Amino acid sequence: MQRKTLTAIATWMALASPAFAQQPTYAPDFSKVEIKTMEFGDRTHVLEGQGGNMTVAAARNGIILVDGKFAPLYDKITAAIAAVSPQPVKYLVNILFRGDHTGGNTPFAKNGSTVIASIKVKTRLAAGTRNFLTGVENPPASKEALPTLTYTHQFKLDLKDRIAELRHVEHAHTDGDTFTNRRYPNIDVLNGGNIKGMIAATAAYLKLANDKIRFVPGHGTLGDKAALTGHRTMLVTARDRMAKPVMDGKSEDEALAAKPYAELDTTWAPSEQASKNFVRVVYHSLTDKPDAKS
């Protein structure tokens, strides 16, 4: 039987998240959350619901699962997986450290799944983080929630009839992931994110793309090559437009007052706050020194 290669199931395929909506400030009622399943083709499905999208890639001897949402959704998630494949989840891949992507680590690990992530995801989980835009503190994860298998640049998961190539991207949304479909991205400058890295990463994705390829964003609807091309054009425009005020020594408040992305906002900003947030993160992408630890 021909072996299928699922390139970039982590940071290249199931990518980042929507504009500043990854960390809910409320407590969701998980009892009311519905996990919806969408077929992706070639024994691959996308699970949608509260938290980040999940990608289910089934092989004959196990499943590779991208992200685990929140722990209280574990039973609903496993029921949805069982409906499309009888195989166990052999690998759970974390694409980034936020709780709506890693909350399921503990229950999946307790039930035999190997949790794998970039070493930087594990480092952020173990240390705890702070959100640049909201100031919300995220405490260190428990030992049980930490990935037990890590990689630095790339890693290959090899099942009987399926290969998943994991490739780490530097300094994009955080230490390594990108692409938000139809929204400004959340560039987490406190945790390794930078608009320059997002542009470079998106260019790398486009090298993999053809007119038939589809991308699974961490949140939101599936994207195609045209959506990704438009996303990169927006990022380049935003970077270039912010370069002059930064070179002229303008402050963050002055950059906000100038409203440099007014016409972009009509397409990319779901709210005025999202527009302001994007100005702030692009400004700090070009003015802040890189995080030495990352």
Image: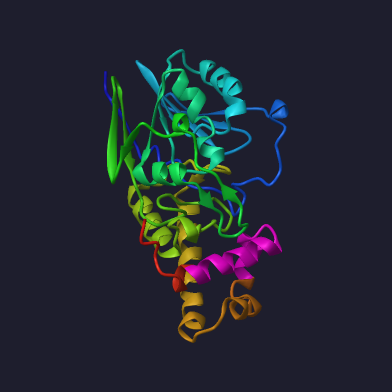
In the picture shown, does residue 51 fall above or below 243? above
Query: Is 170 a magenta residue?
Result: no
Is residue 104 among what the camera can see? yes
Relative side of 36 to 283, left or right? right
**Residue 11 location (% of width, % of height):** 40, 44
Query: Is 265 a magenta residue?
Result: yes
Question: Which residue does the image show at 40% across and 57% down from the upper left?
Answer: 171
Q: Quadrant of residue 10?
A: top left
Which quadrant is home to the C terminus? bottom left
Q: Quadrant of residue 262?
A: bottom right
**Residue 114 location (% of width, % of height):** 38, 26
Q: How is the image coloured?
A: rainbow
Q: Work out whether residue 61 or residue 108 is closer to the camera in this orientation and state it.
A: 108
Which region is colored magenta?
Answer: 263-284
Question: Which residue does the image show at 68% across and 29% down from the upper left?
Answer: 30
In the picture shown, does residue 193 fall above or below 209? below
Question: Which residue does the image show at 56% across and 54% down from the upper left?
Answer: 131
**Residue 159 location (% of width, % of height):** 30, 23
Q: Work out whether residue 174 or residue 232 is closer to the camera in this orientation and state it.
A: 174
Q: Work out whether residue 222 or residue 107 is closer to the camera in this orientation and state it.
A: 107
Q: Work out whether residue 27 or residue 63 is closer to the camera in this orientation and state it.
A: 27
Q: Main secondary structure of the magenta part?
A: helix
Is residue 212 among what the camera can see? no
**Residue 115 location (% of width, % of height):** 40, 30
Relative side of 257 to 204, left or right? right
Which quadrant is home to the N terminus? top left
Number of dots carrying numbers: 0
Q: Residue furthest top?
A: 86
